[in-house]
Amino acid sequence: MDSARQDPDAPASQGPGEALDASTDAAVVVSGDGVVVGWTRGAEALLGHRAAEMVGHRADHLLAMPRDPVRATGVAERCRSGMGWSGLVPVRHRDGRRIEVDLRVSASFRIGEGECFLISARPHRRQWTVGPTFLDGFLTRSPVGMAVLDLQLRYVWMNDTLEHLGGVPREHRLGRRLTELLPGMQAETIEGLMRKVLATGEPVIDYEYLGWSWADPHRRHAYSTSFFPLLGVDNSYTGVCYMVLDVTERWNARQLLSLVNEAGTTIGRSLDVMRTAQELADFAVPRFADFVIVDLLESVLSTEGHGAWLSDAGPAPAKPTMRRAGLSSVREGCPEAVARVGDRADFLPPPHDVHLLTNGEPVLIQVLDPTDDLWIAEEPARAESIRRYGLHSLISVPMRARNTALGLTTFVRSVNPISFQPDDVLLAREVVARAALCVDNARRYTREHTAAVTLQRSLLPHALTGGTALEVASSYLPADPSGGVGGDWFDVIQLSGARVGLVVGDVVGHGITAAATMGRLRTAVQTLADMEMPPDELLAHLDDLVLRLSEERTHERESDRSTTASFLGATCLYAVYDPVTRRCAMARAGHPPPVVVTPDGQFSFPELPAGPPLGLGGMAFETHEIELAENSLIGLYTDGLVEGGHYDMEVGMTRLGELLARSDPDLESLCSAAVRQLVPVPQPDDIALLLARTHTLGDDHVVSWEVPVDPAAVSDMRARATRVVEGWGLGELVMTTELIVSELVTNAIRYAEPPIRLRLLRDSRLTCEVADASSTAPRLRHARSMDEGGRGLFLVAQLTHRWGARHTPDGKVIWAEQEIP
C-alpha cells in the first residue's frame, strides 16, 4: 500500500525500519511555510543537492508526485498536534531519477520565532515476498517427505518426495489412511502418535522406526518422522502435518557400531577356544544370520607347537585341516549342519582354496544356487543342505589375528528372506575380527597355561611310597581352580636304615613363580636329606638357599628398575621316622605343627619349637623327637587347610584332628574326605595334606651285634650275617652279603674307633650297617694296578643298590643296600 496516500489522522506507522539505526538517514529542517532551513550531508548523498543549493529554497520541487495541498495541510496539522508522521514517498534526485524513500516528519518545534519540522528519509527496500507458486514448488520438491492429514488421519496433501518414499501414487493416497496403504510401515504406531499430537498439541520430533515400502519391497529401510498439529483461524486443530526422512544409512551405521560393541562384551568371556567360538555363533543367531558355523584350524586347538599358521609362513596344504568349533541355528538341533561340533570340517566356499584363510577377503554370495556345478562337484552334501533347508545367502569371513590364520566363520540366511548385502560384510568382518582376537588370546593362554601346568605338576611327586615303614596318602588342592600348582609342596623321601623323611612346605604366593621356587626348594630338600642331615641342620641349609634366592630376585628387580619388595618367604616342616626305634625327629620353620593320632583315636599337636620362616636368616632351628606307637597316624599340612574365612587356625586344627581320628583303614579315602570337609569351596590359598600311618620293624626284621676290635672277629661277623640272611630266605644274597660285611667290618676295625656295631635290616631291601665312634667318613677311590688295597668300597658300590654314610651324635654309620630278588 502507498503510505503517501494514507489518512493523515492515522497513527504513525511503526514499521521495522524504526528498529534500525537512523544515524545515516538524510535529514532536512523545513520551516512552516515549506522553506529549507537546514540540509545535511546525508540529504546531499541521497538526493545529490548541496546545502548551498537548497537552504533558503522551497522543498516542494523535490517531490516526484503531484502536489496535494489538502494532504500536506493534514500532515502539518498532525505534526503540530505533537504526533509525528511516516510514510512511503517518491522523491526526485538531482539527476532526475525517482527514488522511493521512507519519510518521517517530526512533531513541530520552534527555532527562534519560526515553526519548523525535521524531515528524515532513507531509501526504501522492498521486502521479499513468497508467492503461492513459489511456495508450492518448494513444498513439492523438498528432499523431506511431507504430508497433511485431516482430523480423521486421511491424506489431504502430500509432496512428491513422500510419494517416492512410499511407492504409492498420490491419487491412491489422498482421502485414505496410512493403515490402509502401508501395513508394513508400522502404520498403527504412527497413527497412534498422530492422535497423541492432536490430543495434546505437543509435536513429536525425530521418531525413528524400521519398515518396508512399495518403493523398495526387498529391503528394510529406517525412517525418521516428525509430527505437529495444524491450527485454523480460530486456533482449533484442523489436521496434522508430518515430515519423514529416509535415514537407513545412518541407522545401519549405528546398528553396526552397536552390534560390534555388543560383540565385544558378549564374545570372549572365557579363555577357552571352543567356548569362544560357540559364543561367536550364538551371538550372530538370530541377530545377523539364521545359521552360523565356526571352523578352526586343528593346529589352533592343539596345545603343542606354535598352534596356528602364520600368513607368511610359506606354502600351505591345498585343503586345510579344521575342526567344527561353534555351531548355531534358528532351527532346533542345527539340522542344516553337515558336521557337528568337534568333527573334522574342511569347508571352504567354492571355488576358494586355503589361501582364503591366509590372505583372502570375506566372501559374499548373495544368492546360493544348490544346482551350481561347483557346489555339486566340491560340496555335494552341503549343496543338498542348501536345497533342503532353503539356504539362500552366505558370507564367509576368514578368522585372522596378529598375522595368524585361525579358521573360517560362515554366516547363512534361510528364514530371513533378505539376502546379505555388501554393508553386511562390513558388520561380519568387524564381529569376526573381535572374535578372532579373543580366540587367539584363548589359544595363547591355553598353550602357555598347559605348559605351565605341565611344568608345575612335574615339580610334585608323582608317586609316594613309605616302604615298609610308612603307609602314605596325600591330597593337593591348588588355589587356581583350572589345575595349576602353587607354592605348596610335600614329599616322602626314602632314607638309609629303613627310615623315611616326610616334608611339607609353603612358598609365599601362587602361580608359576611360586611353583618354580617350590621346585627348587623341593630339590634342595631331597639333596640335603640324601646327605643324611638331621632336621634342624637341613632347615638351616634350606634357610641359606632361600636367602640366596631372595638376593637373586633383588638383583633382577634392580636391573628392571622395579621397587616391588624382593623378599621371598617360605615355611617348612621336616620329619624323619625310624621304624626300628619308632622315634620321629622333626623340626619346623614357621610351619604349623603336625597332627598325631594314636591307634586308639586320640589326636594331639606336638609342641615343637616354632622356628623362624625360611628366608629371615640368623636364627637357629631345633629338632624335637617323639615316640610313635605302631599304627599311629601323623599328618603334615599347609595353613590353607586349617585357615578358613570364618574361623581361626586353632579351630581349623581341631577340626582336622577330629576328622583324622575317625577309624578308616583306607588312608586315601580318609585324606580326601578330610580335605573335602575342611575346604568345601575354593579357597584363595593352596592346600596340601600328607598322611602317614606308622609301622614297626620288629626283631624278626632287625639283628645287631657288637664287633670286637680284633681282625679275627671279621669271620665271625661274616658267619653270623650269613646265617641270618639264609634264615630270612635270601639265599641269593649270601655271597654279596659276606663280601659287604667283610669289607665294612674290616674297615671299621682298621680305621674307626670303638664301639663298633653290625646291624642287618630286612624291609623292602636288605641293609647292612656298621656303626662306629669315628666322625671320619670313607670315600670311594680307584686303586692303581700295583696297590694292595683300596678296592673294597669300590666292590661294595658295584654289588649294592646304593651305599653311603650318615653321621650320628655318637659317630657315624656306613650302610649298604641290596635289592631283594
Image: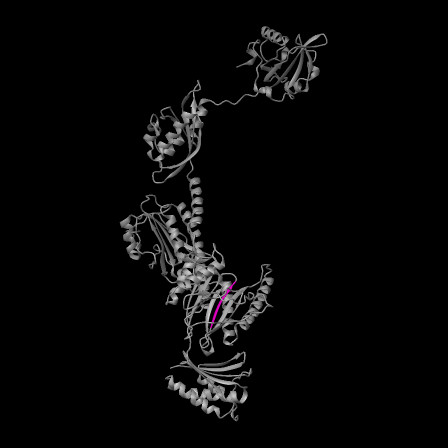
- Identify the residue at image location x=54%, y=88%: 751
Q: Is residue 310 in sight in this rendering?
A: no
Give the side of residue 48 with respect to residue 226, left or right: right
Foreground residue, 630 or 194?
A: 630
90 in relation to 697, above or below = above
- Please state, as top left, top right, bottom left or bottom right, where the C terminus lies in the image: bottom left
Q: Position of residue 655 (x, y in %)?
A: 44, 60
Looking at the picture, how far across and down is residue 332, in whole percent? 30, 49
- The picture places residue 335, in percent across and down from the top left corner, at 29, 51
- Residue 536, x across and y down, in percent: 54, 71
In this rendering, the count of numbered labels is 0
Magenta span contains residue 617: no
Magenta: main secondary structure: strand
Of 781 and 351, the residue lying toward us: 781
The reply, left or right, for residue 751 in relation to residue 134 is right
Residue 506 magenta: yes
Residue 164 sits in which quadrant? top left
Outermost right residue = 112
Please provide the residue range marked out in magenta: 501-507
Rendered view: 90 above or below 504: above
Determine the image quadrant of residue 93: top right
Identify the image's colour scheme: rainbow, by chain, secondary structure or one colour.
Answer: one colour
Look at 44% across and 75% down and name the residue there. 579
Q: Considering depth in this image, is 78 or 31 the residue closer to the camera?
A: 78
Q: Is residue 266 visible to the viewer in this orientation of the structure?
A: yes
Q: Quadrant of residue 400?
A: bottom left
